[in-house]
Image (cartoon, rainbow, N blue to C red):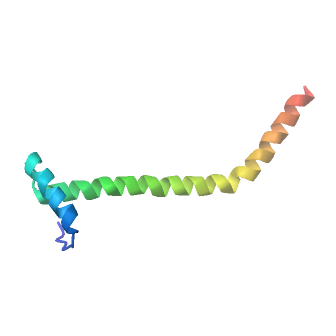
């Protein structure tokens, strides 16, 4: 495990302490779980952005291929 020193806003710290007192969970475990959750959310955001960018790159070609298939369908 790595040791990290960080500064937390007083309001966030106070709210966290209130929650922890009700949960009976160590502060360290709570912060680790929060960071793990946030990392998962951010990975999804990054993936979504990448997929949108890649989708934009192929959009024009996809529309051209679709039109060609539609024209082939009209020939029958």
Quadrant where the N terminus lies? bottom left
In the rendering, at what x and y percent does residue 62 appear? 73, 47
The relative height of residue 63 versus residue 42 in the rendered view (above or below) is above
Q: Residue at x 10, y 47 (%)?
A: 22
Asked whether 66 or 20 is in front, the reply is 20
Say above or below: 65 vs 33. above
Single out the residue that lies furthest toward the top. Answer: 76
Q: Position of residue 42 (x, y in %)?
A: 40, 57
Q: Position of residue 45 (x, y in %)?
A: 46, 55
Q: Quadrant of residue 14?
A: bottom left
Q: Quadrant of the C terminus?
A: top right
- Direction from residue 72 to residue 62 in the image, left or right: left
* Residue at image point 88% right, 36% down: 71
Name of the residue lying farthest toward the front: 11
Q: Residue 31's image quarter?
A: bottom left
Give the residue at x 56% y 53%. 51
Residue 68, image x, y percentages:
84, 40
**Which residue is located at x 81 percent, y 36 percent?**
69
Q: Position of 61 compared to 29: left or right?
A: right
Q: In the image, 45: left or right of 32? A: right
Write down the quadrant of residue 3 in the picture: bottom left
């Amino acid at each position: 495990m790595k040791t990290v020193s960080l500064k937390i806003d007083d309001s966030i710290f106070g709210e966290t302490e209130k929650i922890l007192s009700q949960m009976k969970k160590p502060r360290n475990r709570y912060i680790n779980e929060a960071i793990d959750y946030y990392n998962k959310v951010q990975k999804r955001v990054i993936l979504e952005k990448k997929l949108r960018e890649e989708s934009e790159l192929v959009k024009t070609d996809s529309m051209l291929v679709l039109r060609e298939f539609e024209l082939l369908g009209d020939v029958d």
